[in-house]
Amino acid sequence: MSVRNLDCLFKPESVAVVGASNSPKSIGGIVLRNLLRAGFAGPIMPVNPKYQAVAGVLAYPDVAHLPVPPDVAILCTPPATIPDLIHQLGARGTRAAIVITAGLSDVKHTDGRTIQAAMLSAAQPYTLRILGPNCVGLLLPNRGLNATFAHAEIGPGSIAFVSQSGGFCTATLDWARGRGIGFSHFVSLGNSADIDFGDVLDYLGSEPETTAILLYMESIGADEARKFMSAARAAARNKPVVAIKAGRNPEGARAAHSHTGALAGADNVYDAALRRAGILRVFMLDELFDAVETLARAKPLLGERLAILTNGGGPGVIATDALIADRGTLAEFSADTLRRLDELLPYTWSHGNPVDMIGDSDHRTYIGALQILLDDPGIDAILVMNAPSALAPPEETARGIVDALRAVQRPILTSWLGGEAAGRARRVFSAAGIPTYDTPENAVRAFMHMVRYRRNQEILTQVPASAPTDFTPTPGAARAIIEVALAEDRELLTEPEAKQVLAAYGIPVVETRVATTPLEAAQMAEQIGFPVALKVLSPDITHKSDVGGVVLGLDASDDVWQAAVTMQTRIAKRLPAAQLTGFTVQRMAQRPRAHELIIGVSTDPIFGPVLLFGRGGTAVEVIADSATALPPMNMSLARHMIARTQVFKLLKGYRDRPPADLEAICLTLIQVSQLLVDRPEIVELDINPLLADEHGVVALDARIRAVPCGSTGMAGGKRLAIRPYPRELEETIRLRSGQEVFVRPIRPEDAPMHKRFLQRITPEDLRFRFLGVIRDVPPSEMARLTQIDYDREMAFIAIAPGAGGEEETLAVVRTVSNPDNTKADFAVMVRSDLKRSGLGTTLMQKMIRYCQSRGTQEIVGEVLAENQAMLDLARRLGFTVRPLPEKGRCEVRMRL
């Protein structure tokens, strides 16, 4: 349901407390007293038939006797009373309720349903939104609302905190109060029967009083994954979102048949989802607030190279150890920087990074060294540290540095070690808006928060490179192979079948043949050519090498026959119940210097298909060097994924070993991702090993498990947490002139072409489109225009070959739906030299059909009053036009 009626919850003008009590230890009594103490400006109406007044406030016997319908009602009554109370409130006009009561999913209603189900049914006719049940409540300090039973009050601020755990809520309130941290919103979700993370993120993401959002997460439901991802990505584009996700232990990972399933545990999948959404994940309560303070105060980070400046060698070593342990990057100084530091500092300085200026450096030396580091373009951020020294008094040095940094745009972090004097210095930095920390480790941790946040934001805003080659899959061939296996009641494809599926998507595989007997295996080896590899073929054996089912480097047919006979005998003894259907024979790949990698797929019960990449081979689970990501993929996402592994360092080349073909590896990830999009039956996949060297990649072994569509509970495209590129919306149209143009949804890779398109629009047409004068579209906004969330946005572009044969954009129509899909805002633009060609009309008609198919209720846009051509087009299409004289615009609206 998302944001509908959430204004009643988060901006209430009247409140009722149902179950209010004079008992000092009752939930209803505590909630009412908290409301009264907080200073809420609107009416607070206690409801309880037992009292004439509660806490000195006139009480009402029931909902029907309330003088006005409350915007929000807080329910503190027994479970059995909740559904009827929700019905009464909805009928009175209340549109939001906070249900403190617990146990609603454990108690049956009179009709056999749970109380929780009956509560939701009662709310549904009135679109009444419910926070909870089993929650601590809601705090809105900026509005003087404390609708909780928490013991601590909290001041106003600009941070929103959203938590599933009531215990974590109360602990956080206590912790934040002691540190003077205030909040704009403090939301306890409880059981999230109605309002969930996605709803709150959608609301807070565009809420102007909130500058950052903090989340405490335990889990989200499988039916919430796509909404959560869409809401989180939208919010993270607007403001920092930082999360703690509980439940990191590997015992939470589900059992799986494949290497990929064992490596891609549940916590890794959440990690991948949060990263893809642009959310910074942290692991401790103090980190949560440190991270948001760092992101709010520090200048934007443009790179990851850190310089460390200190007057003590020990703190510098500690900071460096912390940085390297967290896989950070220490900046390398230019020759000019080293020369200038040599001229400034005593000859005993450290002559590298970290810069240890030695203990007798005064504040002027600090400022001089800092200026030299700021002049080095190879440094992206600087950590300045101070150990107590008579020659560099902490507070005086801090004030000098603050003065020196007034016009500096480079991120600077500080760490002044010590007690009282250092504390005064830290307050100087805080007052100047410079991030400051009491230990080197905390300062480095903050820098790495900035690094990870920057990486996650890049995923949201970076324009991906084009794939190195266009691959045209043959999905029909893959579908036929999978259908044969399912028709034979087999979930596991044979190795040859799995390789045929991969080959249908352009993934290089070694030639593999199937033999039913040792003699046939020997004959096939003669045909293929030596040396060959021999593998057992059995539906009951997943990891063939574990049972001696793989023999490599066979050079003669007799060797093949003997190896096959020995394999049969060995497996019959080890696994007498296993069904042996034969052997596979494949040519040995002669690539001795190739890296063994793994690319795989598992299916998470919440987020659906998950991709895995890492170091492969038989020891894959022991090495456990892997990264996970959610499909769909593009080249940038694939590169980010590969870069998170240790094997990436090897793939870049070292000594006499040339770099592997990273583009070929990225393309393989994209091809596997597309296979997942097209074939919903696939629930597990392993390519292990995938050999990769400077010549490209080749899959040596493959394994695929498939199930009938719908048996996973996430059939079709809905099983992906992020809606993939909707290829089914592509079509070729013919203009009035007879020219054929191709119309398709926009893709992230279209950014360069879209930029050229905008360059060919006249200034007047740009003003008509953007409702004002624009000079240029920055890269981040260009990425925003082309990297869209297909679940909530759509942009159709018309393309055709230009004069030089290169594709070019001719026109674009765009809609952005609200989270409830009740309204879509639209805009359309045709290249200035193609106006009156019928292209704008055709694109608008396509978009109208698309919105109708999605159940969107209306399409709305604003048009400059002088843009008569667009107003005429809107009227012809059936839009109503309403002048907005105060804006110099018109609103055009179509009910669908």
Image: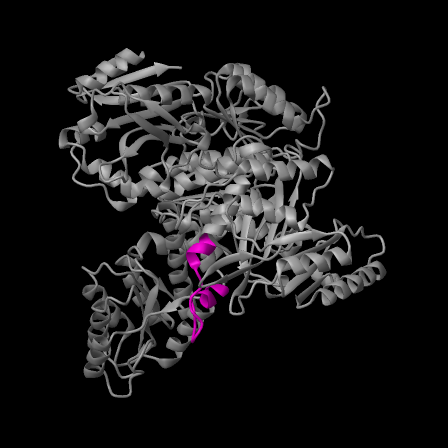
Residue drawn at the location 73% of the way across and 61% of the way down: 549
Numbered marks: total: 0
Q: Position of residue 266 (x, y in %)?
A: 60, 50
Classify 1 as above or below 569: above
Q: Is residue 213 above or below residue 889?
A: below
User: Which quadrant is the C terminus positioned in?
Assistant: top left
Image coords of residue 883 (percent x, y): 21, 15
Q: Position of residue 816 (x, y in %)?
A: 36, 29
Q: Nearer the viewer, residue 296 or 642?
A: 642
Q: Name the one closer to the observer, 87 or 600.
A: 600
Which residue is at 26% across, 68% downward? 398
Q: Quadrant of residue 454?
A: bottom left
Is 248 part of what is drawn in magenta?
Answer: no
496 sits left or right of 5 in the view? right
Residue 713 in sight in this render: yes
Where 271 sits versus 316, above or below? above
Q: Nearer the viewer, residue 701 or 553?
A: 553
Residue 829 lies in what quarter of the image?
A: top left
Task: Examine the rendering and report whether any part of residue 218 can be seen.
Answer: no
At horizontal 28% and vertical 88% (from top left) the residue drawn is 348
895 in relation to 570, above or below: above
* 525 sits left or right of 565 in the view: left
Dividing the picture into quarters, in which one does residue 711 lie?
top right
Viewer-side residue, 121 vs 15: 121
Q: Which residues are magenta?
A: 646-666
Q: What coloring was used for the rendering? A: one colour
Residue 198 position, x and y percent, is: 48, 36
Question: In this image, 212 relative to 24: left or right?
Answer: left
Query: Which residue lies at the image location 34% right of the left edge and 23% below the top edge?
Result: 733
